[in-house]
Amino acid sequence: MNTSGKFHLLEHLIVLIIISVVVALGVVVWSQGSIMANEASAISSLHAISVAETQHRLRNSVYGTLPELKDGNFISDSFLASGKKNGYLFQASPYQNEQYYWYAEAIPERYKNSGVRSFYIDELLEIKATDTGKATSIPQEEAKNWPPM
């Protein structure tokens, strides 16, 4: 029996194991990078919403919902206007029965896959963020107490 053939097979197995480990590490790093990019996009989108809310208020004397911001051409990004962009779900709205206050939120569409942190902004224009541990809508009073970024 040729022992060099067995050694050759063992070498191939080791190379396959090493390649598998490198690929697995690459997937983890890519996933974390994707989450960071989605979160950066969410922050940028909340800035765009804050500008749109200010413009809407100047033109209409009230703040608007996300569909109203889209209909008034205050938001040109069709993905953001739809409420879903880069793995995040967005909502913007004036407080009920309050014409001087508004808020917007961005929550991960799939927690730990598309994002980890949820984001909140209001008329004070300070973005706040936290890891809520889930992908659900944010109670406004709770979000107001999150630490600023």
Image: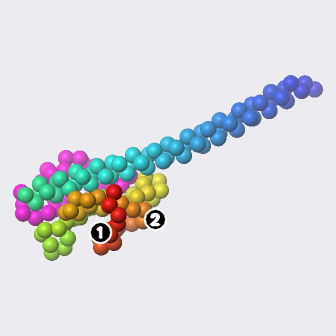
- Three-letter amino acid code of the residue under disc 1: Lys
Residue drawn at point x = 90 percent, y = 24 percent? 2
On-image quarter of the C terminus: bottom left
Task: Tell me if residue 85 is in the magenta stretch.
Answer: yes
Q: Which residue is mark 1?
A: 144
Q: Position of residue 34 (x, y in %)?
A: 44, 46
Find residue 129 and report its image quarter: bottom left
Query: Could you say whether the residue bearing mark 1 is in a helix, strand or loop?
Result: helix
111 to the left or right of 45: right
Measured in 3D between alpha carbons, the distance from the residue under mark 1 to the one under mark 2, in whole angstroms, is 17 Å
Image mark for residue 124: none
Residue drawn at point x = 65 percent, y = 35 percent? 19
Residue drawn at point x = 85 percent, y = 30 percent? 6
- Three-letter amino acid code of the residue under disc 2: Gly
Point out the residue furthest to the right here.
1
6 to the left or right of 114: right
Q: Which range is magenta? A: 59-88
**Residue 52 drawn above or below residue 16:** below
Task: Tell me if residue 67 is in the magenta stretch.
Answer: yes
Q: Position of residue 101 (x, y in %)?
A: 17, 68
Q: Which residue is mark 2?
A: 133
Query: Could you say whether the residue bearing mark 2 is in a helix, strand or loop?
Result: loop
Q: Of discs 1 and 2, which sits in the foreground?
A: 1
Find residue 146 and report its image quarter: bottom left
Q: Tag 1: Cα neighbours inside 10 Å, few (<14), some, or many (≥20)?
A: some
